[in-house]
Amino acid sequence: MVVFRQEMVEERMGDCWSRTKDQFDNLEKHTQWGIEFVERYTKFVKERSEIELSYAKQIRNLSKKYQPKKNSKEEEENNKYSACRAFLSTLNELNDYAGQHEVIAENLTSQIISELTRYIQELKAERKSHFHDGRKAQQHIENSWKQLESSKRRFERECKEADRAQQYFEKMDSDINVTKADVEKARQQAQMRHQIAADSKTEYASYLQKFNQEQNDHYHTLIPHIFQKIQEMEERRIERVGESMKTFAEVDRQVLPIVGKCLDGMTKGAESIEPKHDSSQVVESYKSGFEPPGDVEFEDYSQAMKRTASECSLSNSRAESKPDKPTGKSKGKLWPFMKKSKSPKQHKEALTLRLNDFMASKPKMHCFRSLKRGLSLKLGAGSEDFSHLPPEQRRKKLQAKVDDINKDIEKEMDKKDALIKMKDVYVKNPHMGDPSSVDPRLAETGQNIEKLQLEAQKFEGWLAEVEGRMPVKSEPPQRQSVLYETQNSVPSNDNCAQDRESPDGSYTEEQSSEAQIKVPNVEFDDEFDDEETLPTIGTCKALYCFEGNNEGTISVMEGELLYVIEEDKGDGWTRVRRNEEEEGYVPTSYVEVFLDTNGKGAMTYI
């Protein structure tokens, strides 16, 4: 009966221990899965952070790609037009928008990834400690159980030995053939075995009581306490993951106000676009300041012979009335496309027909100055004084150049003042430096200032020249008496710039090989052979300096008064005479023509 009860207790203890061990294994697997879940979530946040950084980098590169280059034409346009300024504002706001994505990545790294990485290490250490305590408690209860089992088996063995000794004693005592000494010996042996069995029983009872107490403590105190700690650890893990997920959303929410401001900035830039202002800027940028061309006069070719005859008679009458003027051959240059006249009477018709043939063969280039201007624009010809530009554009360029030079002068002046102060400090405190070491730098700065001032004076002179030469309606001068008076009073201007352009940009005497005009190889005369002196039909005043470097042209000075001997026939050139020995062609746009009573008035061509 005792043995059966012991076996029942042993069986129940084995089942209970088995169940406890299974729970520890399950908890160990679950907590390991929890740690792996946190690591997986951390990896997810890390990849999201990398995506944000990559996106921000791509946005920044996109914004940088479309930013205008500094000191470029594109930058000037961006500052000029409202649409370009709005686009530039969008690029700047987009750059700030990319910065907010970088902030998201930084906050995800600092507030979630770093914290979870550190927490995972702490969680692993805590989990290891708890399961170490659980295994230790399990090992202790197992050892107690083994001691109880050993004590029980010994008690069982001693009980069996005591029963055998008692049976042997009873057998010996009933046998009449056994001596009394043998019976006494068997009796003592039986008593000893009973005593040993009693001691084993006491020991087994003690171990059993001890095990029951430890088992009670194990299942009601130690294991529940360990399980409670593991449960708290698991709850903290779950709570920490929840907080990280909340932070994950808050990181995005924190940048939404700034992102909203970036988007508001883009919207504001788009609303600031002013189409009318931009179109007016285009007009302001490209207006030339030229006057529109006048009406094209009708050329009556049927009156050529009559006019030639009348001019010849007028020339003869003028020659008779003024015997003091020479009537020899004229030494002036001819128009470059004119062939040698076969007779003096046919010279004027040959020139007109030659120019008309040239104009008819070039319908898109109506005259020599248009051809010259077209090639200049194609070849990109230019000059330091911007004379290749129309007056209004030239004035703007010169004004901008003057402003830049003045800024450079201010910088050099500030540098000079700083050097002077440094020298004064060195003079007062020689231990701080040698005053003479500043002199070379002062001299260099002074030279720079002098050069800049000279350059500023040069550009200011050109600017004043342009501003003073804008097309202005002027009263016609007096007749010949004023002509001679003005010629005597006009000073010689040696600094008249070559390559100077008329207000319409029609003709320039540029010496650049790139801008030279390639004209057909035609024959022309260098002199007016066998031609009588043409009569004057009016006067003209030179508005600009003109260097007559081409064949058939004549050089004139600004303000000079000349005689008109042949008016513009639609080719853009007027034939003038300075004296009896000098005559030639000048651009019509360079002079203001005053014809006689039969004249047509001043004409301006663009």
Image (cartoon, helix red, strand yellow):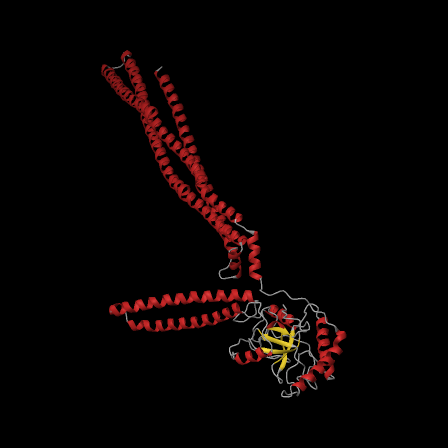
Residue 437 x %, y %:
31, 72
Q: Is residue 354 visible?
A: yes
Q: Is residue 58 visible?
A: no
**At x 40% / y 28%, what residue is drawn?**
21
420 horizontally vs 532: left or right:
left
Vertical placement of residue 239 versus 504, above or below: above
- 222 or 423, which lies in front? 423
Residue 343 x %, y %:
74, 84
166 horizontally vs 256: left or right:
left
Residue 4 x %, y %:
37, 17
Q: Quadrant of the N terminus?
A: top left
Farthest residue, direction right: 302
Residue 175: quadrant of the picture: top left
Vertical placement of residue 377 versus 225, above or below: below
- 163 or 326, which lies in front? 326
- 534 or 458, which lies in front? 534
Residue 423: quadrant of the picture: bottom left
**At x 36% / y 17%, what residue is drawn?**
5
Residue 135 x %, y %:
35, 32
**At x 49% / y 62%, what residue is drawn?**
71
Q: Quadrant of the C terminus?
A: bottom right
